[in-house]
């Protein structure tokens, strides 16, 4: 049976470095990565890359997806322009389809109330506290956290973010997942042999 695609949210000021490890290794594992923008009009990342969305956010349905990835972006902190993406995340979670949010996207989910009852992390606790959300007691000081189908991470942890995604979708498990993380996060040469033996490179 073919896998459902993974949907990557794209919008102006998207933080280029945050979703790359996840999307590259999901694609290598056979997942189609489909980009979803506010509309189908091109967007431009922080790094100046022009991205043409495959579809508009309104056309993204949880039942057609394996995962929704929400990268950080300056726009998460400058107004409510990206609030529809947080509302879409609620639709996904309500439908039992996982969501992964990193950096500023975690603040968007906090404003939507999606972190009030789930363990989560972000850049720092007071960044989320500034949103006025009620989930402060659920904040975990960790590189990335998965709880209730929701993955969260801070802006300096794109590899841990990818680790949680690859684990959740069972692309890698156990010692192979650990080796993947050690290779790409720590440049651990011993991890390479584990991945090579498992055919996971």
Image (cartoon, rainbow, N blue to C red):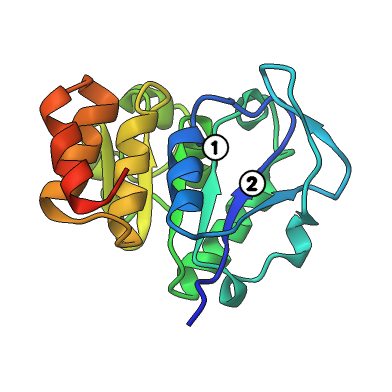
Of all residues, the one furthest to the right in this rendering is 41
Question: What residue lies at 21% left-to-right and 21% top-to-bottom?
Answer: 186
Q: Mark 2 sits on what residue?
A: 9
Q: Residues within 10 Å of mark 2 (few under 14, many from 20)?
A: many
Is 94 displayed left or right of 47 in the figure? Answer: left
- Tag shown at residue 199: none
Q: Mark 1 sits on what residue?
A: 71
Is 21 displayed left or right of 147 in the figure? Answer: right
115 in relation to 181, above or below: below
Q: Is residue 147 visible?
A: no
In this orientation, which residue lies closer to the viewer: 61 or 133?
Answer: 61
165 in relation to 10, above or below: below
- Chain-order first, disc 1 or disc 2: 2
Q: Position of residue 26 (x, y in %)?
A: 45, 51
Asked if the residue under mark 2 is in contact with the one under mark 1, i.e. CB atoms within 8 Å, the reply is yes
15 in relation to 116, above or below: above
Is 133 displayed left or right of 90 in the figure? Answer: left
Q: Position of residue 18 (x, y in %)?
A: 49, 30
């Amino acid at each position: 049976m073919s896998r459902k695609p993974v949907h990557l949210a794209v919008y102006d000021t998207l933080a280029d470095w945050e979703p790359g490890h996840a999307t590259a290794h999901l694609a290598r594992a056979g997942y189609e990565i489909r980009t979803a923008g506010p509309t189908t009009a091109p967007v431009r990342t922080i790094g100046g890359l022009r991205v043409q969305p495959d579809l508009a956010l309104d056309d993204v349905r949880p039942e057609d997806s394996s995962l929704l990835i929400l990268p950080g972006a300056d726009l998460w902190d400058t107004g409510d322009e990206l609030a529809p993406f947080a509302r879409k995340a609620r639709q996904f979670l309500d439908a039992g389809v996982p969501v992964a949010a990193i950096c500023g996207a975690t603040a968007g989910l906090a404003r939507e109330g999606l972190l009030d009852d789930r363990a989560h992390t972000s850049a720092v606790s007071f960044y989320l506290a500034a949103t006025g959300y009620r989930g402060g007691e659920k904040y975990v000081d960790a590189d990335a956290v998965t709880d209730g189908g929701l993955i969260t991470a801070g802006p300096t942890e794109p590899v841990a973010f990818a680790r949680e995604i690859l684990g959740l979708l069972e692309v890698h498990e156990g010692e192979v997942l650990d080796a993947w993380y050690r290779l790409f996060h720590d440049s651990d040469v011993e991890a390479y042999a584990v991945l090579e033996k498992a055919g996971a490179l």
